[in-house]
Image (cartoon, grey):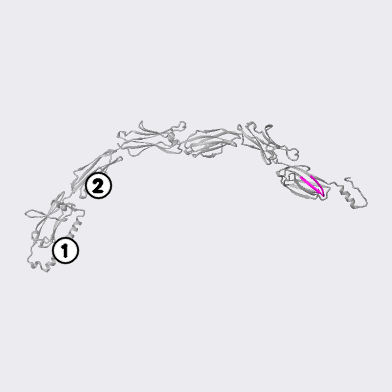
Amino acid sequence: MPGKMVVIFGATNILWTVFVASQAFKIETTPESRLLAQIGDSVSLTCSTTGCESPSFSWRTQIDSPLNGKLRNEGTKSILTMDPVHFENEHSYLCTAMCGSRKLEKEIQVEIYSFPKDPEIHLSGPLEAGKPITVKCLVPDVYPFDRLEMDLLKGNHLMKNQEFLDDVDRKSLEIKSLEVTFTPVIEDIGEVLVCRARLNIYEMDSVPKERETTKVMQVYISPKNTVISVNPSTRLQEGGSVTMMCSSEGLPAPEIFWSKKLDNGNLQLLSGNATLTLIAMRMEDSGIYVCEGVNLIGKDRKEVELIVQAFPRDPEIELSGPLVDGNPITVSCKVPHVYPLDRLEIELLKGETVLKKKDFLEGVDKKYLEIESLEMTFIPTTEDTGNVLVCQARLQIDEMDFEPKQRQSTQTLYVNVAPRDTTVLVSPSSILEEGSSVNMTCSSNGLPAPKILWSKQLKNGVQQPLSENATLTFVSTKMEDSGTYVCEGINQAGVSRKEVELIIQVVPKDIQLTAFPSESVKEGETVIISCTCGNVPETWIILKKKAETGDTVLKSIDGMYTIRKAQLEDAGVYECESKSKSGSQLRSLTLDVKGRENNKDYFSPELLMLYCTSSLIIPAIGMIIYFARKANMKGSYSLVDAQKSKV
């Protein structure tokens, strides 16, 4: 009988055999028949025997797949460890134990699952009242998903239930989810979204069969109804101040941000306060200001345009030159530093008559101060004198709460008449004898009355100023006073001039008539007859030889006449006449030519030497006399050559 020991007296071996035979050979497994393991865990299958001192073990799967585990035998125990568990471990494992010729087997079914985490709740965006939102409830890394069931609730209200029965044979870790789209309302604030997942695997006592996640709903309201208030006005005078306040509705309460829109469209952040104050404003502060209400889910903006108006000074009237009767003139009416340009209008009037009008509508996009002007050209006449030019500028802004809206400047017209009809009266005459007196009186018509300026025209073309009196007087004229005199009538409208030629005549005097080397020469000698006049530059010098049959005009050079090898017939009376515009003077001398005594004396060595010497010396002395006379007559000239054609 098992469990009972039979004592047989007499033999020890027989007793042991009887004891062992009384122990039956058995096999046991842990777990007994079924194991549910989560993917990623470490699990062990244990196979043990009793009734055998040294059993042998072997493991295999039912379809002879790899064990995908580590095997360890310890005496009567064999352990198969799977670390980590994966899909390849989902088999029916068979443990075989051998004891001698006896063989025992036992099967353990290994099933796997994955349900490691609680579900997750995802929103497609913030919960905004009145705007549809999608809620996604998902379970990550789940297996087997054909056993999965999910619920999505809002409070106690089931919004959706879903099972996943498709692809039952697909072995993979997947994320399973369900989605619901709904429109939240303000009343949903504080309500709870519940995502609940169940893995319907029965006999699971040691693992969670159900997991859930909750999310408290915070419903938002996007900013709206953004409002800007401006004090005192959106149109301001340069140097003024303005306060702008902004408010916006929303949940949570929006933050307020002030910005200015730049020319390139970008926004320049100015403040994070609801109130924006600008002081001492300049024209550059004009522009579009933006208030934005911002919270977690959106923004709402409002714009306001500030116009800093610049109209600081009266317009200016400018003329391109003096007003001259009959001359075109350009009048400019300038308005400095005005803004906004497209609201400006300029008028130019003469008296009450509008000459020209201009607006600047094309300047609507200009955001800077400019000097704008209106120009026109007209021809003034003397009848315009006393009339008034009016430059009138208006800034056409009805909302302007400052004055003036209109500025103007005036200028009385004084039309000038350029000098004309300039005349010169010379008394007694413009041709005078040296030492006489003369008055030259100049007059010129114009408006204003021209100023008189006398000057003398020099030979180099320069005018030498002489007097600003109407009458130019010479008490005792000199020869150098001769020349061209210019009278100019001058006013701011122009210049008029008149020229007069003054001629001072001088009677020739200091005439010298000489014969070199002497007035008495011998036949065959050379003699030079020279006539000079030292006080009058413009003189005519005429040399003549007197004779009963008539006078002979001699061809002289600068008043000098040379007789080479004088003959007896060269003897006689020689006369020099010096003439000018004012008169003439005469001088005469008698030349004596002595004849030869005999041929011997004529050709004596002494006479021959004297002749040769005199032929060299006399021309040299003549040249000396010529240059000396030239030095005495500095600035003068002779008209002898000019008279040769008359002789």
Q: Depth check: 256 or 298 in front?
A: 298
Dot 2 lies on which element?
Answer: strand
In three-dimensional space, the C-alpha distance between marks 2 and 1, rounded to whole angstroms, equals 48 Å
Q: Depth check: 203 or 67 in front?
A: 67
Q: Depth check: 139 or 56 in front?
A: 56
Residue at (65%, 32%) from the top-left corner? 188
Dot 1 lies on which element?
Answer: helix
Q: Is residue 104 left or right of residue 572?
A: right
Q: Earlier in the sequence, mark 2 or mark 1?
A: 2
Most distant residue in the front direction: 101
Residue 319 point in image, percent of width and height: 35, 38
Q: Is residue 45 left or right of residue 323?
A: right
Say if mark 2 contacts mark 1, CB within 8 Å.
no
Per the image, the residue denoted by label 2 is 456
Q: Is residue 301 left or right of residue 29?
A: left
Residue at (6%, 54%) from the top-left corner? 549
Mark whose residue sits in front, 2 or 1: 1
Per the image, the residue denoted by label 1 is 617
Quadrant of the snapshot with the N terminus? top right
Q: What mark, if any, has residue 578 been given in the picture?
A: none
Classify 10 Å Cα crowding around label 2: few (below 14), some (14-19), many (20 and above): many
Q: Is residue 462 magenta?
A: no
Tell me the kind of residue under disc 2: Lys
Residue 584 point in image, percent of width and height: 14, 51
Residue at (27%, 38%) from the top-left corner? 446
